[in-house]
Amino acid sequence: MKNKAINSNPVSGLTAAAGELTGEVILKWKAVKNASGYTVEISNEKDNENWEQVDFVKNPKCIITDLSPGHSYIFRVSAVSGSSRRKRSGTLNIKL
């Protein structure tokens, strides 16, 4: 079965809120039509050229844990459909 294509617009509406636990952040964004999941990536404020995938989720929400209070982090999200990846969201800077 062929996967439905997702359009080339980036993921939008990326927001963050403090989680219930220390060092926890809840990321949310607008759902993307035909996306089978989302790749969530993190970098630190000093070096935003090195990105690390921290999660792959099926819904437009992700809880990131084990972050260090007082540190800054940068997040971005990409929608995925089959083997196709959509343009990444803009970055979101967070200081805990």
Image (cartoon, rainbow, N blue to C red):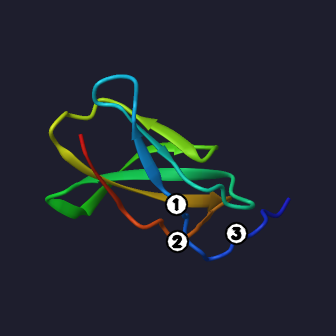
Looking at the picture, how far across and down is residue 7, in whole percent?
Answer: 68, 74
Q: Is residue 47 above or below residue 95?
A: below
Looking at the picture, how far across and down is residue 67, in whole percent?
Answer: 26, 34
Residue under the point 82% across and 64% down:
2
Q: Are marks 1 and 2 in contact (CB under 8 Å)?
A: yes
Which residue is label 2 attached to?
A: 87
Q: Is residue 27 above or below residue 66?
A: below
What amino acid type is highlighted by mark number 3?
Ile
Residue furthest top as drawn: 21
Q: Secondary structure at mark 1?
A: strand
What amino acid type is highlighted by mark number 2?
Lys
Looking at the picture, how far across and down is residue 31, in whole percent?
Answer: 65, 55
Q: Is residue 92 left or right of residue 89?
A: left
Which residue is label 1 attached to?
A: 78
Residue under the point 19% across and 33% down:
69
Q: Is residue 72 above or below residue 20?
A: below
Q: Which mark is residue 6?
A: 3
Residue under the point 50% across and 52% down:
39
Q: Secondary structure at mark 3?
A: loop
Looking at the picture, how far across and down is residue 28, in whole percent?
Answer: 52, 47
Q: Earlier in the sequence, mark 1 or mark 2?
A: 1
Q: Nearer the viewer, residue 73 or 1?
A: 73
Q: Secondary structure at mark 2?
A: loop
Quadrant occupied by the C terminus: top left
